[in-house]
Amino acid sequence: MEVTMKNVQTESVGSNFVITLINPAKRNALSLQVLHELIEAFGEAQKSDALGIVLAAQGPVFSAGHNFADMAGATKEDAELLFQTCAKLMQVIQSVPQPVCASVHALATAAGCQLVSTCDLAVAAESASFALPGGKGGLFCHTPLVAVARSISQKRAAEMAFTGDAISAQTAYEWGLINQVVPDDQLDNAVTEMLRRATRGSRWSRALGKRTFYEQITMSQVDAYEFASAIMADAAVGVDAQEGIDAFLNKRDARFTQES
């Protein structure tokens, strides 16, 4: 389907592709239209030469998650389409080859918190906060909890979901929901630095590593080792791995060229 970008802005900044939610009047809510725009934006990023992807937002809220106004009076089919499209977006974020870093400047709640949890990396400003508020109301955060429970411990995820209380950026860092918390005026620089460190080395090797990570993380330990060992054996004899090994042994800078 053709998607008109009204709520999402894309731009290249240095070596990164920046995707920004730009509908602060709606608290950057994840309507069906916004979800389609984000899927389109990540598709653009995947095809670009960018080494990393930043997911950011404008306004007083990073994202309020799904808009209840979109669900009021909805049919079951409408609701299923909304949540299935949201799940598709989350899978797209983890399938693009570049590392994706969320730049969280404010409240990320419900599916907005799910969005942050799904990104490979996340840096938050001190004034940011995170919540799964459904536990306090009539619609439990079932799908946001899928992502959050894969980022933090079961007990902490359950606490967020059942109480619905927001946690601070510092608490989110301590619980492992985000990678770093910084003063508000240092957020952009911190995100850029995070992606600089996360995008060094072979682009091909990094993309393979991301794909393998998300495939093995839900396997049993025995299956994960079998799967990862086979992947790593194939990678070890590849062009970029051999270039990296030779560069290390000969104390020179590596020149990575592998594309597939």
Image: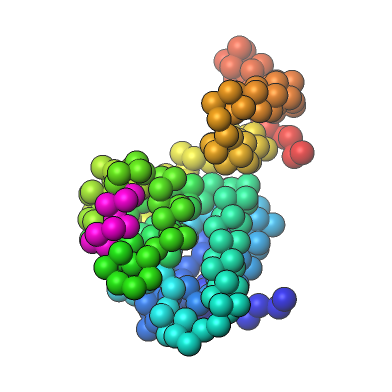
Start-end of magenta stretch: 157-166
Observer-nearest of 248 and 232: 232
> Residue 223: percent from the left, percent from the top?
62, 27
> Residue 140: percent from the left, percent from the top?
37, 65
Coloring applied to the structure: rainbow
When the figure is inspected, residue 214 is found, relative to residue 76, above or below; the finding is above
Residue occupying the far right of the picture: 260
| Residue 184 seen in the figure | no
Give residue 79's quadrant in the image: bottom right
Residue occupying the far top of the picture: 249
Residue at figure coordinates x 51%, y 84% from the top left: 74
Point out the image quarter for the C terminus. Answer: top right
Please identify the dominant SS of the magenta region: helix
When the figure is inspected, residue 62 is found, relative to residue 100, above or below; the finding is below
> Residue 239: percent from the left, percent from the top?
74, 26
| Residue 245 seen in the figure | yes
Residue at figure coordinates x 44%, y 85% from the top left: 72
